[in-house]
Amino acid sequence: MRPDILNPLFAETDTLDGVGPKLKKPLDRLGLTRLRDVVYHLPERFVTRRAISNLDEAEVGEQVVLALTPTQHLGSTGRGPHRVLAEDATGNVCALVFFGRASYSAKKQLPVGELRWIAGRVDRYGDMLQIVHPDHILERSDASLGRLCEPVYALSEGLTQPRVAGLVEQALARTPQLPEWIEPGLLEKEGWPDWRDALVLAHKGENERARDRLAYDELLANGLALMLVRADNRRRNGLSLQGDGRLRDKLDLPFALTGAQARSIGEIEGDLAQESPMLRLLQGDVGAGKTVVALSAMLIAAEAGAQSAMLAPTEILARQHYETLRRMAAPTGVNIALLTGRDKGRARESTLMGLMDGSIDILVGTHAIFQDSVAYKNLALVVIDEQHRFGVAQRLMLASKGKRAPHTLAMTATPIPRTLTLAQYGELDVSKLDELPPGRQAIDTRVASTGRMEEIVEGVARHLQTGQQAYWVCPMVRESDYATEDIAAAEARFATLKERFGEAVALVHGQLAPEVKDANMQAFVRGDAKLLVATTVIEVGVDVPNATLMVIEQAERFGLAQLHQLRGRVGRGAEKSVCLLLRGDELSETARDRLALMRETQDGFRLAEEDLRLRGGGELLGTRQSGDNAFNVASLEQITRLLPKAHDDARLLIERDGGLTGERGEAARVLLYLFERDYGVQLLRGG
């Protein structure tokens, strides 16, 4: 149960004054559904203004607060602005400029001859200073002091800065004092304020210590939860799986295992033999051969008379794994089945029976394989592909499916920097596949300007004439109101390529109906479609060996990790593959560095570290599209700097300070609920 002290923070936002159904919608869009979300909606930056006594002191482009007296309203003619002329104390004249509807309120707020304090940015237009759309028009001088440093919050349509600031103020007023969960020595050494003060200070101005304290809390909550999961796992009784090699010996692989694959299989075999359930992450760069390692693990389970289940994030991937495993495992005679949400009627019934009577050794599928109606005779190993799509809570749900807790092997093709492995997978042991299988050729990576579009389309035409296939990836689905004209929308690009190539082009993006998306994808996998226009939905796992050209439009918009994932969709067959990165004309220095690195190396682990260094690594955490352990407070820089401390502190609390009992332990329990990492608490007996 959530501690009562947190109840005020978990109240809905519509309990705040002034929040009705109309305001609740834009708040929900920002994810601000409870007071806790509002107090943690930290400012993106601050506007700092200088108080000046007259316009002579103002610098053009500077944010200021000063007293002005309106002298004349110049109404707009046609669609022009409404201008208000105003004087400072020395008689200097300035124009206050309003566009659109704002001009109506300007007449009320700025009566001629009455002194007002104006906060805003001073600009020059012709030979006159002006302030366009003042941020504040105040009647009292004391009110203007509060406008010298102001937070700027992320907004959604229907919200304004003053409205969000007002809601934050209300929410902070209702925020209780919470017990201290940080180790006293560390708190003193870092000079951090207590939790409630840190929240208040973080909304008031640039306060690094307050921000660090709040980020640290989030990292500590995460580290504690993962350690509790791990400790709980070690206490559980699993099934010791010891294979005799009879099935693995029958595998007829077309290539020898790499050293990294053999090492990883050895580590997994050692884990499976133990009684405490395995929790291992298999990190393999794109195309490093994770599937063979996973199959070996599942064959060990089958040799020991137990069942395995492999979970994939999408139906397309599940089908692809099913076909690959069936092909590889054919000589062994093991029975492999597929189960997705679409399977109905007799086929589904027969699969369910096979799982219950034990005649199915390996089941591949989507989330459907963990529905209540799916029962196993002896499920002892769960393999999760694309680990970042499933959060800790889902991982725990799987653990309840076997008679005893099953062994878990999680796999990801997203190379994660060492720093972040701890943050995301602190409860898992890690195996790395850092060698590519023999026969995999390097992908020829080139950079070209979007200005050469006609040449590029002709190049694609020549490529398709050879009988090979190609991908064309666009950064956005539709041109939004905020996007500039030059953003290549996938739908627009599809339309132009369809004019050139006709029915040979298919389109896939996240906003298509699932059945349309799957049908288009399958047409490409079968080879009916030769060119696939897509957004990054194809980033993970689609395997079409005949596709040997990847065009990525506006490549500068992607992070390194994403570019590397996309490039890994080609180079899967015997033919030489090319990845063409199309760039816009104006590149930032970071974008230039990224594209140069892509040409220079194909080592995903090195690229992940570089991504972190270039600060484009936000998407490394962002790639976990539906994991439930993302960081909302801690920035990437804070994670890198504070995570080791938080991890050590969590270990200290569990091992030395009696876990979640005792004074500090009770406070830590509050912390886990505050950050909704309470799955950690629930693992404790009677938690």
Image (cartoon, grey):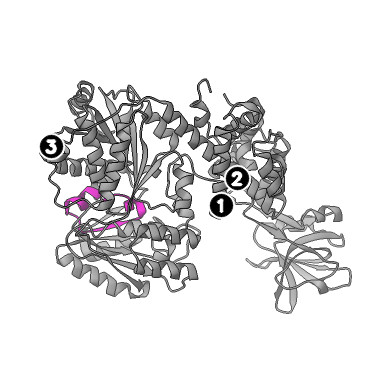
Disc assigned to residue 332? 3
User: Depth-wise, is mark 2 or mark 1 nearer the camera?
Assistant: 2
Along the line of sight, the residue nearer the viewer: 71 or 262: 262
Identify which amino acid the numbered label 3 is placed on: Thr
Question: Of the residues shown, which amino acid type is indicated by label 1?
Answer: Ser
Q: To which residue does mark 1 refer?
A: 635
Separation (CA) of disc 2 from disc 3: 51 Å
Residue type at mark 2 is Tyr
Dot 1, how many residues are within 10 Å of its Cα: few (below 14), some (14-19), or many (20+)?
Answer: some
Are circles 3 and 1 on residues that touch, CB within 8 Å?
A: no
User: What secondary structure is found at the residue carrying circle 3?
Assistant: helix
Regarding mark 2 in the picture, which secondary structure is present there?
helix
Q: Residue at x 39, y 70 (%)?
A: 596
The N terminus appears in which quarter of the rendering? Answer: top right
Q: Is residue 530 magenta?
A: yes
Label 1: state its secondary structure.
loop
Q: Residue at x 20, y 67 (%)?
A: 463
| Residue 562 vs residue 278, the one in the foreground | 278
Instruction: Give me the C-alpha separation between circle 3 and circle 1.
Output: 49 Å
> Is 60 drawn above or below residue 573 in the view shown?
below
Q: How many marks?
A: 3
Return the residue at label 2.
216
Q: Are marks 2 and 3 in contact (CB under 8 Å)?
A: no
In the image, is 103 to the left or to the right of 417?
right
Q: CA distance from mark 2 to mark 1?
A: 10 Å
Direction from residue 336 to residue 181 in the image, left or right: right
Residue 332 locus on image (x, y percent):
13, 37
Q: Is residue 646 above or below residue 483?
A: above
Magenta-tinted stretch: 521-542
